[in-house]
Image (cartoon, coloured by chain):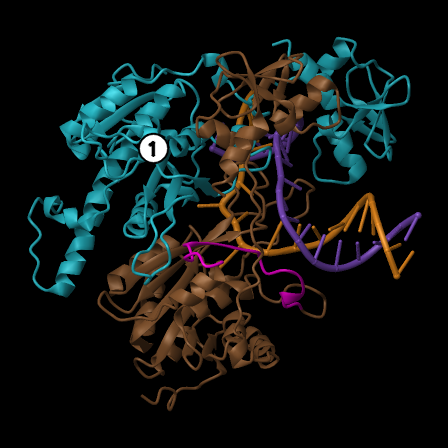
Chain colours: A cyan, B brown, C orange, D purple
Amino acid sequence: MGAGLDLPLDKVLVGDCIETLRALPPASVHAIFADPPYNLQLRGELLRPNHSRVDAVDDEWDRFADFATYDAFTREWLTECRRVLRKDGTLWLIGSYHNVFRLGVALQDLGFWILNDVIWRKSNPMPNFRGRRFTNAHETLIWAAHSQDAKYRFNYAAMKSLNDDLQMRSDWFIPLCTGAERLRDEAGRKLHPTQKPEALLHRVLLSCTKPGDVVLDPFLGSGTTGAVARRLGRRFIGIERDPGYAAAAERRILSITPHDEAALVGTPSKREQKRIPFGVLVERGLIAPGDALTDRHRRWTATVQADASLACGTARGSIHAVGAAVQEAPSCNGWTFWHLVQRDGSLRLLDLFRQELGGEG
Amino acid sequence: MGAGLDLPLDKVLVGDCIETLRALPPASVHAIFADPPYNLQLRGELLRPNHSRVDAVDDEWDRFADFATYDAFTREWLTECRRVLRKDGTLWLIGSYHNVFRLGVALQDLGFWILNDVIWRKSNPMPNFRGRRFTNAHETLIWAAHSQDAKYRFNYAAMKSLNDDLQMRSDWFIPLCTGAERLRDEAGRKLHPTQKPEALLHRVLLSCTKPGDVVLDPFLGSGTTGAVARRLGRRFIGIERDPGYAAAAERRILSITPHDEAALVGTPSKREQKRIPFGVLVERGLIAPGDALTDRHRRWTATVQADASLACGTARGSIHAVGAAVQEAPSCNGWTFWHLVQRDGSLRLLDLFRQELGGEG
DNA sequence: AACGAAAGTGAATCACCGC
DNA sequence: TGCGGTGATTCACTTTCGT
């Protein structure tokens, strides 16, 4: 589909997040990253859904009003995010213990399906000065799909590759945004109080989008999401209420040089690779009818037929079906089970023949 | 005050958690640790790559009709906990992304004051077998005071001493409960599906109680809370609905020999060794996608991808895998094989970048 | 007895395409 | 839409088995 025809791509939209979201077309973005305000002191700016002002009576009522107002605000912008998100898209939230529980419940109540919570472990957190609590050394991200049965993209191989060929875990160790990466004004003061590190967004966007996808950030702030999206060859839409932040973010993002396209290909997952039927190996003569296949331990031997089926004892069928039959297993990946017995008696995994052909395009 | 005069101390009370809590006097316990059902909402069975079945938590006690039912249950037992908790006491909850957001919101709505969320990082979590999500490698604890202005106990010095004289952080690295610590029946099957490690409770109880304090666990299960409380010289009250679990927990707790009061030494939790994946260098910008790597003799050149994999001819994979492939060697240490080709054409060994980052550990 | 290989296991919301 | 076939997918640690 012609995603993006009506979308204000690669721009920072200055305005109220909910109103601006309402102007975007439905099911139009592949991923959303949201770092909403969580300082409940901002409640003065928040209104009830009916736009009445919150009127504090006593402590008990005040506390309830605070959370209720925050919850109403959260559900309003999350509802719009869900409308704008494609059915196969995913959404990320980040928060601390002050607000992240409210965010998670709102997500679940609105029909999002949580896929993971992810812990950003800070290598250099601020110490606890008064010694009255544990050092608050992490923030929590929530990753969610549009709904329970929605398909979604998870670049498993890319994440595994980022982590030295081990599955990426749900706890990420990443430093705070400091030093040259931190935006500052002329006086050297930090421009934005909660600028997120680019390394965090690098991992987020690499995990769930592909080049060309559209990434939305409804609370753009200093623009980290846009900067990393641009560097990784993704399109973005940023929404920011504060004109000063919006201008700084736009300057920052435009100064980014995207990576070479060739460097963005990364590790294709096996699911995405072109499917090569076993028959092609026989047609091309890499495997000949009559050749013997065996498993790693040479426990079973099968003979290749001219139609690329296998024969092993009385079992007949595909490399997968016969592999499953001899092992008495419910299923089997024949590609990684069977080996060709070569002329010199050594074994070569079928999957290696397939990889050779895959290189042809 | 004469805490404990009316309390059923150092016993396991068999019964419904809410009813049993209602029979306890108000403001009578110093700390509560609660490990409620997680409401996992599992569908169908999950097979490992070797076709064996994952032994999931599908017990009746973990099934709820919907979130509203779970929320109502949660608020009911938390309300009783708050009544039973002393004004200067604190409460710990543990959960996963399935339920922990509901727990946190219930806490806040009932007037508890969250002090920290704490991440239990598992050293040996179960992998994600289908490659569809991040490895779920942690659980979340919430630590809360009775109310916003309540005094509470935090044994700052003890926690600091447990952590090599650095402030204890909010992320804890502790192994699963396995091996000899795991309770088993005669057939060798685990007695309880979710037995928590004693190291976790050791840290929890040491952080917020003193010897002689009363610790309550409304979902005692296998009895870890009672066992650690007894070993640390704390009194306890356990509530457990299942008579089988309750009996096993009581046996377990009675078999514990309390520590000498003098010998309340630190947790022997294994220290985490530093392991820096190559991907971290890419995320942090020390190596950029598109950069060229070469070996010492400049025989082979590879290009870095955004996911930190290498591309060299048709070979793709980790720095180790591609290093091995080009040399046609069975293995290769990519850190000491590949060099970055720097702007001026000179080479810099990857391992030197890693050593720079290593200091952060 | 010692050593190495193989099997077992842990709170899990764990495919997808084509007909 | 439902069904069937293809084929993708695991880390750290403990225990047991075999030589």
Q: Is residue A51 left or right of residue B157?
A: left
Q: Is residue A22 left or right of residue A322?
A: left
**Is B169 above or below relative to B335?**
below
Quadrant in which the C terminus of chain A appears: top right
Q: Which residue is mark 1?
A: A179
| Front-most of residues B321 and B300 | B300
| Front-most of residues A130 and A152 | A130
Q: Which chain's residue wears label 1?
A: A
Residue at x-position 53% and y-position 29%: B353
Q: Position of residue B28 (x, y in %)?
A: 34, 81
Does the image show residue A40? yes
Q: Picture quarter containing residue A146?
A: top left
Q: Is residue B233 left or right of residue B4?
A: right
Q: Is residue A183 magenta?
A: no
Dominant secondary structure (helix, strand or loop) of the stretch shown in magenta: loop
Q: Is residue B201 left or right of residue B338?
A: left
Residue at x-position 39% and y-position 87%: B4
Q: Position of residue B224 (x, y in %)?
A: 53, 70
Does the image show residue A155? no
Q: Position of residue B120 (x, y in %)?
A: 48, 55
Q: Amino acid at mark 1?
A: Gly
Find the magenta span and give its range.
B164-184
Residue at x-position 11% and y-position 44%: A45
